[in-house]
Amino acid sequence: MKPGAADALLFDLGGVVIDIDFDRVFARWAASAGCDPALLRARFSQDELYRRHEVGEIGVAAYFASLRKSLGIDLSDAQFLDGWNAIYIGEMPGIVALLARAAQRLPLYAFTNTNPAHAAYWSVRFPEAVKSFKKVFISSSIGLRKPDAQAFEFVVREIGAPASRIVFFDDSPHNIEGARACGLQTVLVNSPSDVAAALAALGI
């Protein structure tokens, strides 16, 4: 990666732009259900219904109905939603300023695997975190999710730049591998300092 090596920057949201913690979800659900969070953590999986929810094939009510069975807790949709949105902590430290600076030089986009309930929450709760993006690609809206090749190919076409000229930032090694296989430049993000270092290498 070197100055002038990119025509566009593509960012994951959760874990890169917005800090998340799934343990907060289990804690909130467990408090409502009167059980041990560790029990829910052990029972939860990103199963086929989770995937279908993230690509918009089933709605939130159907997904919560599946959780009642898989987790063995009888919460209302409102209680499930309260815990579901507890995953979000806040903006990653310093990321808003980094994005604003980068947006002065290159077009910024985001690509997130998420469902309508989460998208409705973060878009209102963290407007500053997403305001620098020209467009946010949401898996449940486009019907495609990372790390599938079709998802990256769709996003690359929409951005309109060669894959090799797009730098993709994500905290998931699987998503990084998928993007790299589709020809994108990639940055595995463990903290905002990784974003800052990559931008500096690009001359931003």
Image (cartoon, rainbow, N blue to C red):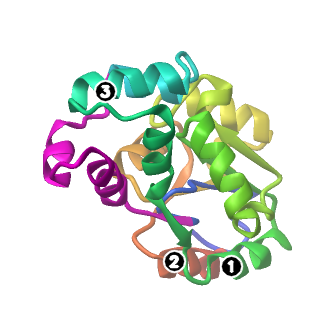
Specify whether 120 is left or right of 36. right
Specify whether 66 is left or right of 117. left
Q: Which residues are magenta?
A: 18-47
Q: Position of residue 97 (x, y in %)?
A: 72, 81
Q: Which mark is residue 79?
A: none
Sequence-earlier tag: 1 or 2: 1
Bin the neighbour count of mark 2 within 10 Å (Cα to Cα): few under 14, some 14-19, many 20 and up.
Answer: some
Does the magenta run of residues contain 27?
yes
The CA span between labels 1 and 3 is 41 Å
Q: Position of residue 93 (x, y in %)?
A: 55, 82
Q: Position of residue 35 (x, y in %)?
A: 17, 48
In the displayed structure, would residue 6 be above or below residue 157?
A: below
Observer-side mark, 1 or 3, equals 3
The CA span between labels 1 and 2 is 9 Å
The residue type indicated by label 3 comes to Arg
Q: Which mark is residue 192?
A: 2
Residue at horizontal 43%, vertical 45%?
Answer: 175
Of 122 and 152, the residue lying toward us: 122
Q: Which residue is mark 3?
A: 68
Q: Quadrant of residue 10?
A: bottom right
Of 94 and 44, the residue lying toward us: 44
The residue type indicated by label 1 comes to Leu
The CA span between labels 3 and 2 is 36 Å
Q: Are marks 1 and 2 in contact (CB under 8 Å)?
A: yes
Residue at horizontal 53%, vertical 27%?
Answer: 60
The residue type indicated by label 2 comes to Pro
* Residue 204 visible in the current orientation: no
In the displayed structure, would residue 140 be above or below residue 92?
A: above
* Residue 91 visible in the current orientation: yes
Q: Which residue is mark 1?
A: 98
Q: Which element type, helix, strand or loop, lies under badge 3?
A: helix
